[in-house]
Amino acid sequence: MISANYHTHTTRCKHAVGTEREYIEAAISEGFKILGFSDHTPQPYPDGFVSGIRMDMSELEDYTDTLVKLRDEYKNDIRIMIGYEVEYTRKYFEPLIRELKKYPLDYIIQGQHFVEDEVDGFYVGSATDSEERLRAYVDFTIEGMKSGLFTYLAHPDLINYTGPDDIYYRHMRRLVEAAIDLNIPLEINVYGFVDGRWYPCDRFFKMAAEYNPKFLIGCDAHTPEIIRQPEHIKGFTDFLLRNGIKIGDNVVDIVEV
């Protein structure tokens, strides 16, 4: 059993279901000692651009107020932590961090879905055989990692590169090496596994495990039912074993934002 999950969403992101209380109760029933909420962070995008996959900037206060109250209510049962899954961007990252710091905040995790950003860039989960896009994803993700503000990197293999293995390894190996140099754990994503997505993939994690970076499991819970222990997820333990991945209690050192 693992003790912690730091990757939990709320309905504010527009594609998750269930109340915060339901996620907490699910975590308690599965034996978790720490539950971190890390909903998709809002972004200070230009006026007129509305994201369909994240909360609005105006929802920051309600998000934190709700979690602060539940954190106090459940303090004898589980430790509730307040975080965000953040897109690193060159245009919006610094003003975003300044805004997030106005509210109770324990940590942020890096979830790089776009390069360079949602307004002007490309979605990395779209299937592509472009080495240019693969290189851009790795370069940009490492740039974000070097900010020193992220507790870990969510779904590092989100990039859906369909080209040759040698090109894939050439670039993704750099991501693993950066994670080691910067002491940033790499997430094995439960939601992608349960939902039958292209990640987490053996191609990445078999290679990554050879370098022995830090790994952790992130439920990436968009429904309360996703908050489960690894042994309760069909095939997940086998995935870890065949890729040579060992997980401890899943508790990580939190990076101060």
Image (tube, rainbow, N blue to C red):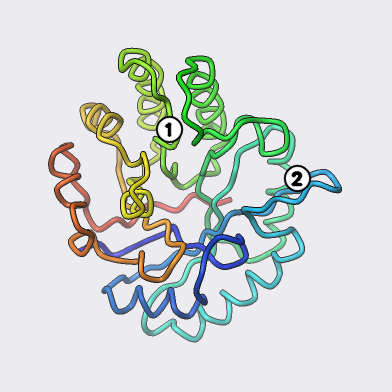
Labels in figure, total: 2
Residue sitting farthest toward the right:
47
Q: Residue at x 35, y 22 (%)?
A: 173
> Where residue 84 sits: x, y (%)?
56, 56
> Where residue 16 sits: x, y (%)?
52, 64
> Label 2 neighbourhood size at 10 Å, few (<14), some (14-19), many (20+)?
few
Direction from residue 222 to residue 236 in the image, left or right? left
Direction from residue 170 to residue 114 in the image, left or right? right
Q: Secondary structure at mark 2?
A: helix
Return the residue at label 1.
182
Q: Residue at x 32, y 46 (%)?
A: 188
Q: Secondary structure at mark 1?
A: helix
Q: Which badge, 2 or 1, comes first in the chain's sequence?
A: 2
| Of labels 2 and 1, the one closer to you | 2
Question: Vertical placement of 194 versus 137: above or below?
Answer: below
Direction from residue 121 to residue 80 in the image, left or right? left
> Where residue 38 sits: x, y (%)?
52, 59
> Label 1 neighbourhood size at 10 Å, few (<14), some (14-19), many (20+)?
some
Location of residue 183 by image quarter: top left
Q: Residue at x 43, y 32 (%)?
A: 182
The one nearer the camera, 180 or 195, is 195
Q: Disc 2 marks which amino acid?
A: Pro
> Where residue 159 sits: x, y (%)?
45, 32
Return the residue at label 2.
95
Q: Disc 1 marks which amino acid?
A: Leu
